Amino acid sequence: MKNKIKVHRAIHDMTQADLAERIGVSRQTINAMEKNKYVPSTVLALKIAKLFETPLEEIFLLEEND
Amino acid sequence: MKTNYLLPHKYKRIGWVLFVLGLIAGGYMILTGYEQDVLNMTVFSIHSDDAIFGEAKGFFQLVENDILDELIAVFIIVGGLFISFSRERIEDEFVYKLRKDSLVWAVIFNYIVLLLAVLFVYGFTFFDVLVFNMFTPLIFFVFRFHFMKYKSQSHEE
């Protein structure tokens, strides 16, 4: 799975730490997701989409091998 | 992240103190020899066998014993458990995954090392392998968990 968290974070002018604090996770978690090393739970994905006021599919995208 | 088996975060620091003290004292004991009669006292034993250490043989009795090695083992085990199973400052689903992955890794790695030791270590040195193996699952876990946590902390881009 790919994600565009970094892009949306830039649009909203947030640092990793800002985003981490807003959705109640550690900065490592944001970092790991942006580097595609961690696939977030559905709950966390929904929280991120809600914060960015964007549909889930705009941020998280399936890849061919998923 | 709700988990019902984790201790509060403050236990982590207590854990590190016990763990490091235990490892240092344990290392010293391995270099200088077990049972040096420094903390001799009478202890209750469920089973005691005179084959190795010279205590009286039998079940449910009081025996003389140097409790230094017992203390060291308790420090390392309790300290290691406190470190491993205390909440992180921010305990979220990624930390939860790191902890689980590290546990699996530590068990597999530990048994690979033990297998190699079983196959290639002979004689009385194998006793040392058994002693180390009481603590290596915890040590491997603590090392791997903190290494992975440190690695994922890399600079912001």
Image: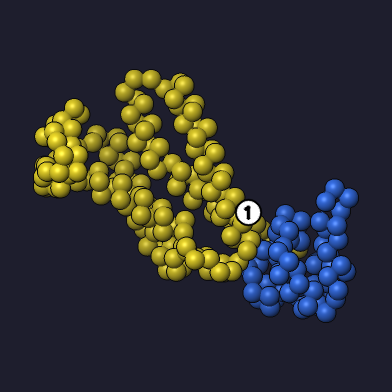
Chain colours: A blue, B yellow
Residue farthest front in this picture: B59
Question: Where does residue A51 sit, x and y in percent of width and height?
Answer: 77, 78
Q: Around disc 1, counting alpha carbons within 10 Å, would you say few (fewer than 14), some (14 to 19), or many (20 or more)?
A: few
Observer-nearest residue: B147 or B133?
A: B133
In front of the other: B7 or B139: B7
Q: Is residue A29 visible?
A: yes
Q: In front here: B128 or A60?
A: A60
Position of the N terminus of chain A by quadrant: bottom right
In what element is the residue under mark 1? helix
Please, is residue A57 above or below residue B143 in the view?
below
Judge from the rendering whether residue A4 lies leftward or rightward of residue A39; answer left or right.
right
Residue at image location 35% in from the left, 50% down from the top: B76
The percent position of residue B92, horizontal first and vertical second, equals 60, 66
- Up the image or down, A43 lies above or below B85; here it is below
Task: Note whether B103 is above or below B32 in the view shown.
Answer: below
Label 1 marks which chain's residue?
B
Residue at point 49% right, 51% down? Answer: B142
Determine the residue positioned at 29% across, 47% down.
B72
**Horizontal side of residue B117 vs B64, given as left or right:** right
What is the quadrant of residue B118 in the picture?
top left
| Residue wearing tag 1 | B151
Q: Is residue B150 visible?
A: no
Snapshot quadrant of residue A5: bottom right
Q: How many marks?
A: 1
Which residue is located at x 83 percent, y 58 percent? A2
Measuring from the top left, give residue B151's x and y in whole percent. 63, 54
Going by the numbered disc 1, the residue's amino acid type is Lys
Image-based side of A2 in relation to B63, left or right: right
